[in-house]
Amino acid sequence: MRNETQNRSHSIEPHMSLREKKGAWSEDLFQTFGLTPEGADLSYEKWLSSVHSRDRAGVDSAIRSAIYGDRPFAIEHRVVGEDGRVRFWRIVGELLSERVGGDLMMVVSSMDITDETRSAAVLKSAEQRLKVLSSRLQKMIEDERTRIAREIHDDLGHALTLLKSRLSSLATKDKKSGDFITSECESMTDSIDSMFDSMSRIATELRPGELDHLGLVATIVSHAKAFSERTGIHCSMNMNIPLEVEVEPDLATAMFRIFQELLMNIARHSEATLVSVRLEYDERWLTLSIRDNGRGIHRTESESYASFGIIGMRERASLFGGTVNLRGRPGKGTLALVKISRAGHSDRATSDNRECKAGEAKRSE
C-alpha cells in the first residue's frame, strides 16, 4: 500500500473483502478512530458509520458504483471521530485484478485533507468578501462621480453663465469707447464657450446625464458619436434593444463603463479606423460586442496582470456573473465580447453574502 502524505495520511482496509465486507486496517487508521486491533469492529458498516451523516449516502453510492462498474473511485468527504471532531478526507480505491482466496478484494487509501479544505474555505470566503467589497466600492465611486458631475454642471455652469451675460452687457455698453473693449469681450466670450464645452465633457465622463434620464441605449449612441467626432474613428451602431426597455440601473452603469473603457483602449492602442458596436438584451443576458479593424490585440496583452483597464472591466462584469473576452487577429482587428447577467448587482451581492456565511458555517462544523 503506497503511503500518500498531505497533513496526515492513512491506509484504509488495504485488503477489504467485498464478500465479507471486512478489511485489514492500517495502524494509522486505528489511531484515527481511537481503536485497537483487539476486538475492533472492522466491518464496512462500521467504517461507513464514521462518515458524516450528510456525506454518508453519497460515499456509499460512489463505492458501490465503483464495485459494480469495476472502475476506480475518488471521493472527498467528512469523517466524525469518536471525540466528535470533524475531519475532511479524500479517499481513492480500486478493485484488485486478481481474487484472493476466491474472494474479490478492493484496495482503498485515504488522505487527511482537513487543513487544506479549511484553508480553501477561508480563501473562498475571503474572495467572496472582496467581491462584495468591490461591489460596494464601485457603487460609492459612481455615487461620488454623480455628485461631482452635478456640482460641476450646477455651480460652475451657473457662474460661467453669469460671467458670459455680464461680458455681453459690457460689450454692448462700451461700444462707443472703441473696438478694443468689444473685441476683448468677444474673445473672453469665446473662451467661456470653450470652458462650457470642457465642463460638459468632464461632467459627461464622470457621469453621463443621459444614463440616468434617457437610458443605456441613448447614452451609448451619444458617447459613440462624441468618440467619432473626437478621434475620427467611425462607429457603426446596432442597438438590438427596444427603446422602451429599461435596463436595470446598476447593470446599465456597469455596461456603459465597460463600453467607455473599450473605446478608450481602441483610441489609444488599436490604430483602427472603423468600430462596429452591437448591443443585445434577452431574458438572461445583456451582451455587448465591439469589433474594430485595428492591429489586433495579442493574447499576452489581454491576459496580462499589468493590463489594469482589462482587469477592471472583467471585475465589473464578474460582479454580475458576467465575462469580458478579447480576441485579436494580427492586422485584422479585435473583437470584444461582454456578457453580463440580468440578475443585477443586488442579487449578486446577496448571493455573495450567502456564500460567505456558508463558508463560515462549513469551517465551524
Image (spheres, helix red, strand yellow):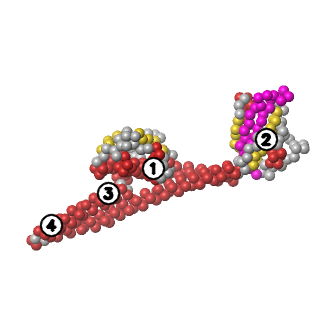
Residue 172 is drawn in which quadrant?
A: bottom left
- The region drawn magenta spans 85-112
Q: Amino acid at mark 4?
A: Ser
Q: Which residue is mark 1?
A: 310
Depth-wise, is mark 1 or mark 3 nearer the camera? 1
Q: Which residue is mark 2?
A: 12
Disc with the residue nearer the chain's start (4 vs 1): 4
| 108 over 118 or under it: above or below | above
The answer to whether 42 appears left or right of 357 in the picture is: right
Q: Which residue is mark 4?
A: 183
**Could you tell me which secondary element the residue under label 4 belongs to?**
helix
Verify whether residue 277 appears in magenta.
no
Q: Which residue is mark 3?
A: 201
Q: Residue at x 37, y 53 (%)?
A: 212
Q: Amino acid at mark 3?
A: Arg
Q: Residue at x 29, y 51 (%)?
A: 230
| Cβ atoms at labels 1 and 3 below 8 Å apart | no
Disc with the residue nearer the chain's start (3 vs 2): 2
